[in-house]
Image (cartoon, helix red, strand yellow):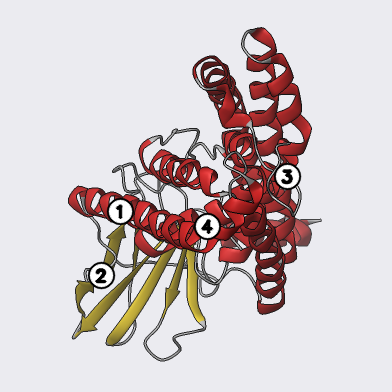
Amino acid sequence: MHIAEGVAPVPVAAAGALVAAVGVTIGLRTMQDRQIPRAALMSAVIFLASLVLRLPFGPSSVHPLLNGLAGLILGWAAIPVFLVTLFLQALLFQYGGITTLGINTVTMGLPAVICYYLFNGYIRKKGTGRGGFLGGVAAGVTALVISFVLWAGALLLCGKHLAVIVGLALGPHLGLVLIEGLFTGFAVSFLSRVYPAIFEVPSGREGNGSA
Amino acid sequence: MKKISGVFFLFLLVLAVRVPALAHGARCSVRERTVGIEAVYDDGSPMSFCEVIVYSPDAEETEFMTAQTDRQGRFAFCPDRDGLWRITVGDGMGHQVSVEIEVEAGTARGAGGSRDGDDRIRGSIVGISVIFGLFGLCSLFFRKRGISGERAAGAEGGTRCI
């Protein structure tokens, strides 16, 4: 679910870059040193998942986004993580593009931050068991749905027709929602059991407290 | 009455005579010198029914034609002049590949766009290395800058990136 190189007109690409720059700045300002290994690991997981986990739904090829999980673990720091990951994907594999990097970063990173605000507290409270799993499922599904809406909106601004976008991508992503939700649910459930501190994310500009 | 029957008979006779069509006909011939491509994803699965855009040597930014790949991710066309043609195949979801084809006296020669499994593995290794290298540098920079911040925040606190 990227926007390819050359698809976005200059004003749309510039607006995307501007919003992404604001998000990256906030992400870097709230990021703490103890979060850096998590950010690197999450970036590597997202990068590899897009290459290895290809799901053949219909004629298209889709892959897990994992932005719900990234948001739960990293909060605002998920935006710089997606910037790095998407840059490497565009550079090495022509997924997305350099000129559309800002739009793609916003499309993937903003839902991660929304999921952090919606579900991080709930998951930390519920911890292990069914509550954590359901919170993870909800985060995975919500992040994917918001990403899809943002991506479709960006393509509409790029001059594509809604019917074409929906006809092309809705079917594959309905299948992906299920897999993304279950994967995030199991991952959250597992991490809550073995390393619950991973969901402690610093919030606010002072950056030395937990959410 | 006899006159009308005669005209009607003549009309039927005209309809019965087989004559070749003189206009709005169509015919086709088989062209041997075509340029064909096959677009696949990195994992080898075909880019089926994806949008194809062809750019001619004369106008590199203006689309010469648009089309669609078939189920196997294949597409072919007949270039009408020699030079460097560029073909872009995209699935509309951000996965795109471009190939440049040099056409000389009707013969095509590909130049780029192909990527095999080894390239994919190499790219993955490079990507992972860059990610950990970048965040490692970030951590180093962070710790150097954050010594005073850490003292102020205490051992539990940690430091900010910017």
Give the residue number, with chain letter if any, for mark 4: B147
Give the residue number, with chain letter if any, for mark 3: A203
As drawn, is A150 to the left or to the right of B43? right
Quadrant assignment for the C terminus of chain A: top right
Q: Position of residue B74 (x, y in %)?
A: 34, 54
Are the residues flagged by discs 1 and 3 in contact, CB closer than 8 Å?
A: no
As drawn, is B14 to the left or to the right of A56? right
Are the residues flagged by discs 4 and 3 in contact, CB closer than 8 Å?
A: no
Outermost residue to the right: B1
Which quadrant holds residue A35? top right
As drawn, is A186 to the left or to the right of A14? left
Q: Position of residue A71 (x, y in %)?
A: 64, 39
**Looking at the rendered structure, which numbered label has been put on residue B129?**
1
Disc 3 crowd, CA 10 A, few/some/many (<14, 14-19, 20+): many
The residue marked by circle 3 belongs to what chain?
A
**Looking at the rendered structure, which numbered label has been put on residue B138?**
none
Q: Indicate the secondary structure of the residue bearing disc 3.
A: loop
Q: Nearer the viewer, residue A195 or A180?
A: A195
Q: Nearer the viewer, mark 2 or mark 3?
A: 3
Going 71% across and 33% down the picture, which residue do you hit? Answer: A142
**Looking at the rendered structure, which numbered label has been put on residue B112?**
2
The residue marked by circle 2 belongs to what chain?
B
Q: Amino acid at mark 4?
A: Ile
| Dot 4 and dot 1 within a common chain | yes
Are the residues flagged by discs 4 and 2 in contact, CB closer than 8 Å?
A: no
Q: Nearer the viewer, mark 4 or mark 3?
A: 4
Q: CA distance from mark 4 to mark 2?
A: 49 Å
